[in-house]
Amino acid sequence: MIDLEVVHIEETDSTNRWMKENGKQNDMVVVAEYQTAGRGCGTNSWESERGKNLLCSVFIHPKDFQAKSQFIITQLVSVALCKAIEKFANKPVEIKWPNDIYVGDKKICGVLIENRLQGRMVKDTIIGIGLNVNQTEFKSDAPNPVSIKQLTGKDTDRDEVLKAFIDEMNECCRTRTCIADYKARLYRREGKHKFMTQNTVFEASLVDVKDDGRLMLEDDMGIAHLYRFKEVTFIIKS
């Protein structure tokens, strides 16, 4: 059971960085009204209008998670987010590998998970979340953003969304069904779609995601290929 202390702050450059500097030994979540330098995976940034979206970082100490199996944390978080968002968006929500959260072909939530290891085990985890809730205009060059308000036409209480996510995290931890749920929710899990690797565009079918997080795609010749994060890109029309 995850029991979190909730801290609200007005502004920070990054809630993940704030948590690294201010997180204690207890599980907690920091929620910011605005981020001046919100980060996604790699070099990605995150656009958010002040006071409109859910910008937070969750600090937890997972129990009995081995370092070699740490991708299960990504699966657990992604599934919990999908289930929480569906309660408010009233639309099917999917996971674009490895952990972008999508409604149709549009991105509603970005996630940045940073695990610290101790020997062969995961010591603690910071889960950074940028979820589009009440923003309706996006001015950056991000190609395909969408918010809950754009889907429903009404404002949503951000604290309620956060509570729903934490509840779903607890449920996923209790049932331990997140691996199957993750694979069932994968974006483009059916049919052939366009991808790109090393500046080459190709068509392939999504076959599986391995326990270590690698994506398995099958090409037109029926040959399976494994890709690590950033080694392959989804081609999505904006």
Image: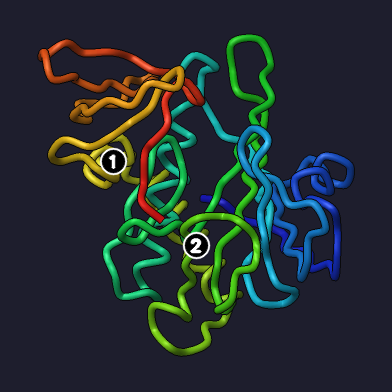
- Residue 209 appears left or right of 18: left
Of 76 and 86, the residue lying toward us: 86
Q: Percent x, y for residue 189?
A: 21, 40
Q: Amino acid at mark 1?
A: Thr
Up/down of 99 relative to 35, above or below:
above
Q: SS of the residue at dot 1?
A: loop
Q: Nearer the viewer, mark 1 or mark 2?
A: 2
Camera-side residue of 191 and 162: 191
Label 2 near label 1: C-beta < 8 Å?
Answer: no
Residue receiving disc 1: 177
Residue 181 in the image: x percent, y percent?
Answer: 27, 44
Residue drawn at x 66%, y 54% as measured from the top left: 46
Left or right of 41? Residue 233 is left
Q: Viewer-proximal residue, 83 or 166?
A: 83
In the picture, residue 142 is in which quadrant? bottom right
Task: Say which of 183 and 179 sits in front.
Answer: 183
Considering only order in the chain, which callout, 2 or 1, is on the residue closer to the N terminus? 2
Q: How is the image coloured?
A: rainbow
**Residue 124 vertical position relative to residue 3 in the rendered view, above or below:** above
Q: Amino acid at mark 2?
A: Pro
Q: What x and y, as percent, mark residue 206? A: 22, 30
Residue 56 drawn above or below residue 186: below
Give residue 67's position: percent from left, percent from top: 55, 17
Question: Residue at label 2?
Answer: 145
Q: Residue at x 78, y 40 (%)?
A: 25
The single residue placed furthest to the front in the displayed view is 200
The CA span between labels 1 and 2 is: 29 Å
